[in-house]
Image: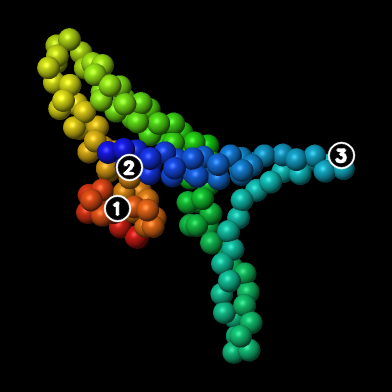
Amino acid sequence: MDDLIAFLEARLAEDEATARGVKPLGHTDALGGIRIEHAFAVTRLVASGEDGSYRGEADEAAAAHFRRHDPARVLRGAAALHQILRMYREATAGGSLVSPFLRGQDDGFRQALEEVLKVKANVWAGHPDFRSEWSTGEATDG
């Protein structure tokens, strides 16, 4: 499990660094005293003729996808996974995370968290450091 946790923490750090490096969608910059409103658009290059030339064509579906998965959402997802990792660490440190009603169920809770961490790791199944034993068999490449 230590390797899986190290893998998850490394991927989270990469995702968080990337997300923090992007200005939020719809932000405003001041350039020489002029306010510039930034929008988000995606253009795909489409072959436009026999001469091998291309033209830009708006891709609204891709733009909508990128807007939906903006940096703030990535950071919220990372924070949620950090919380699950904290819960796992507490469960393996001998502390009890379950209610008094369920005392004695801690081992089952820890095992469930291990499975959740494996499922979450499948987000990065295409990463070269991803191990086949972490695969849930559910990941797809689209």
**Residue 101 x, y percent position in the rendering:** 14, 11
Callout 2 touching callout 3 (CB < 8 Å): no
| Residue that protrudes farthest toward the top in the picture | 100
Tell me the amino acid under the disc marked 3.
Answer: Gly
Helix, strand or loop at mark 1: loop
Name the residue tied to disc 3: 33
Report how far apart the C-alphas of labels 1 and 2 lie in the structure: 9 Å
Characterize the local packing of mark 2: few (<14), some (14-19) or many (20 or more) Cα atoms within 10 angstroms: few
**Total label count?**
3
Mark found first going from the N terminus, 1 or 3 = 3
Q: Amino acid at mark 1?
A: Arg
Could you tell me which quadrant the C terminus lies in?
bottom left
- Where on the picture, by quarter, is residue 26? top right
Residue depicted at x 17% and y 10%: 100
Q: As drawn, is 140 to the left or to the right of 61?
A: left
In the rendered image, the vertical position of residue 136 relative to residue 9, given as above or below: below
